[in-house]
């Protein structure tokens, strides 16, 4: 079918649908929901069989849904209506939730139902649930809806609340008073649910040390207690705040009335306002743990769960230290696991934007992540694996390719490009890594294109070596088995790796690749062309796009080249 994705932004759900539906053989194009005239023009140009809306912030105009089948992907169970579906599900501690694909009509979220899927809820923030459970359920429901659309005689089911199996209902937009925290009365679990129901948008409004802030990134703080509402400790980027019966870590804050009204590490936002409280090491059981390590026989697993996958200078330095410590262990294979939501998204644009000199901080950040990538590439004592359980973008993708093996979860979406960030050239040794793993032609196409890709395409291009399945338990089991196999065949594999790397070094030193990449990055950061700084500002400050890039709006790209789905 010809499917037009109408979206407010090209978020994780939209990207996954774009990748998977193209893989299914559909012709998919994207149009940002800018205004009615632009959307009408897009429909006239593309003439889609169906308009699919997985992420909207307003109703589809009547003149469009009356003329063309429009399907809404609603993150709620059958009968649920309103803009805060997932927020309410988290706050009310629902055991299960779902996604409904329904037809756009006059009344919001009340049109005929084409398909639905449900899933068990997990104790996690709204963004995490959205990226994983909601996205998986949405893909299943959309596929079912498209199958139904292709089935002669199929009629979507009208919504009748009198049916006993319908437990959804019309719910209002959630407001700040609905999730306001009463630190004197609320227990830890209730505080976590309130913050998670608003993570990452809009956050829970609160006041800390006289600062008006929004709370994000909440985790339990086991073993910590204090006077309810008090800041009782810090750990890396996070503050610990006492509840009625314990404490929570709050990793990130947003101060809307400040010079930096976007999410930043909590300790950075509150710098100069924090009381004299204990500092707890991030590597301890009671600390705010971003980096973890465990041994399993001859395999070491290094996890790094950085918020939204962004890696600041400090985080890169800490991860490099943890990697070097892992090399000192009596193991043969090191698996870099990343986090479950993101493996890595490269340099930390928010901390760069907040720096006194964004150019200088960009330079420090790219060098810090290059130091980590270089250490991985130069490793001669171990075999290394990037086990990508979560999505990854920009420099994070090439940091993964620095490992000897890259293994993917089937549901991962990768964005291996820099160009949308003001035509950044990029580093992390991609000019060395891509040609050797992907071939020169695929390397060129990966570097030039601006589209997301799924696991199957990444493997076909050589950007990854294999995908290990979509089920979480099955993925982890196969990961352990495959890593153990590497350890069993270690000596021969390591010798071949070392010989190959030394031969490459003689052809052209690794330092030369780094110098060449960084010379071009320096021009991006410090040169007369300010495209990178403008793009970064717009990204960090969530400035809505004024048009859809022609790389996504295929119907507007008259010179569109064949997509990378045909690459081999």
Image (tube, rainbow, N blue to C red):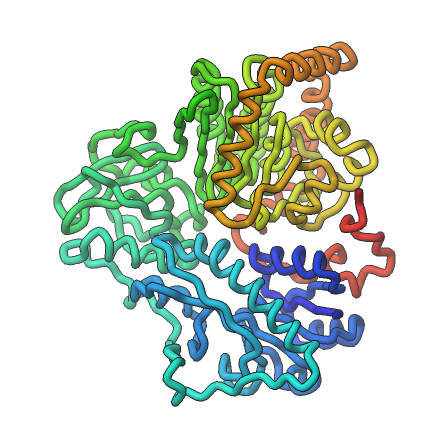
Q: Going by the image, does 225 lie left or right of 543? A: left
Which quarter of the image is occupied by the C terminus? top right
Q: Please tell me which residue is depicted at 44% across the width and 50% down the height of the picture.
A: 261
Establish if 543 lies above or below 154. Answer: above
Q: Nearer the viewer, residue 157 or 490?
A: 490
Asked whether residue 38 is in view, the answer is yes
Which quarter of the image is occupied by the N terminus? bottom right
Q: Going by the image, does 181 lie left or right of 360? A: left
Asked whether residue 537 is in view, the answer is no
Q: Please tell me which residue is depicted at 18% across the width and 49% down the height of the picture.
A: 243
Q: Please tell me which residue is depicted at 69% across the width and 75% down the height of the picture.
A: 50
Give how far across and how far down residue 59 sits, in percent: 56, 77
Q: Going by the image, does 49 lie left or right of 278? A: right
Q: Please tell me which residue is depicted at 69% across the width and 40% down the height of the picture.
A: 459
The number of callouts visible is 0
Q: Nearer the viewer, residue 511 or 361?
A: 511
Locate residue 497: give its quadrant.
top right
Give how far across and how far down residue 79 sits, in percent: 43, 79
């Amino acid at each position: 079918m010809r499917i037009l994705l109408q979206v407010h932004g090209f978020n994780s759900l939209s990207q996954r649908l774009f990748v998977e539906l193209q893989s299914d053989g559909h012709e998919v194009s994207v149009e940002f929901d800018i205004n009615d005239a632009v959307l009408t023009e897009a429909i006239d140009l593309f003439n889609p069989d169906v308009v699919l809306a997985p992420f909207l912030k307003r109703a589809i105009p009547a003149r469009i849904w009356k003329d063309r089948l429009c399907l809404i992907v609603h993150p709620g169970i059958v009968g649920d209506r309103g803009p805060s579906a997932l927020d309410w599900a988290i706050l009310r501690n629902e055991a299960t939730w779902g996604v409904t694909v329904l037809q756009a009509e006059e009344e919001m979220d009340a049109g005929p139902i084409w398909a639905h899927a449900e899933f068990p809820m997990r104790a996690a923030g709204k963004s995490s649930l959205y990226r994983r459970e909601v996205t998986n359920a949405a893909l299943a429901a959309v596929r079912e809806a498209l199958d139904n659309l292709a089935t002669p005689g199929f009629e979507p089911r009208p919504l009748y609340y009198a049916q006993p199996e319908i437990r959804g209902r019309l719910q209002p937009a959630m407001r700040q008073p609905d999730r306001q925290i009463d630190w004197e009365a609320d227990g830890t679990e209730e505080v976590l649910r309130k913050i998670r129901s608003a993570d990452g948008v809009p956050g829970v409004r609160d006041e800390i040390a006289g600062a008006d802030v929004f709370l994000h990134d909440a985790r339990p703080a086991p073993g910590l207690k204090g006077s309810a509402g008090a800041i009782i400790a810090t750990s890396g980027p996070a503050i610990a705040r006492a509840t009625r019966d314990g404490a929570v870590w709050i990793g990130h804050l947003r101060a809307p009335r400040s010079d930096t009204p976007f999410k930043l590490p909590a300790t950075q936002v509150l710098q100069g306002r924090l009381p004299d409280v204990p500092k707890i090491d991030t590597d301890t059981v009671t600390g705010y743990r971003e980096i973890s390590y465990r041994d399993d026989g001859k395999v070491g697993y290094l996890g790094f769960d950085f918020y939204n996958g962004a890696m600041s200078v400090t985080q890169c330095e800490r991860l490099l230290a943890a990697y070097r410590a892992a090399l000192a262990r009596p193991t043969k294979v090191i698996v870099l696991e990343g986090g479950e939501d993101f493996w890595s998204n490269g340099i930390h644009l928010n901390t760069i934007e907040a720096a006194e000199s964004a150019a200088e901080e960009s330079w420090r950040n790219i060098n810090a992540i290059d130091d980590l990538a270089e250490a991985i590439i130069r490793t001669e004592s171990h075999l290394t694996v990037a086990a990508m359980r979560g999505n990854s973008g920009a420099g994070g993708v090439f940091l993964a390719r620095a490992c000897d093996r890259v293994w993917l979860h089937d549901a991962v979406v990768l964005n291996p490009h820099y160009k949308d960030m003001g035509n950044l050239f990029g580093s992390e040794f991609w000019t060395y890594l891509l040609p050797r793993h992907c071939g020169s032609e695929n390397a060129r196409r990966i570097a030039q294109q601006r589209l997301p890709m799924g696991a199957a395409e990444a493997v076909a291009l050589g950007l990854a070596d294999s995908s290990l399945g979509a089920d979480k338990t099955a993925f982890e089991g196969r990961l352990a088995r495959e890593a153990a196999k590497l350890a069993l065949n270690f000596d021969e594999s390591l010798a071949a790796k070392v010989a190959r790397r030394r031969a490459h070094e003689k052809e052209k030193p690794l330092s030369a690749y780094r110098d060449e990449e960084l010379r071009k990055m320096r021009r991006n950061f410090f040169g007369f062309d300010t495209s990178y700084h403008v793009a970064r500002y717009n990204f960090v400050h969530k400035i809505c796009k004024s048009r859809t890039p022609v790389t996504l709006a295929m119907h507007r790209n008259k010179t569109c080249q064949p997509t990378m789905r045909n690459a081999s």
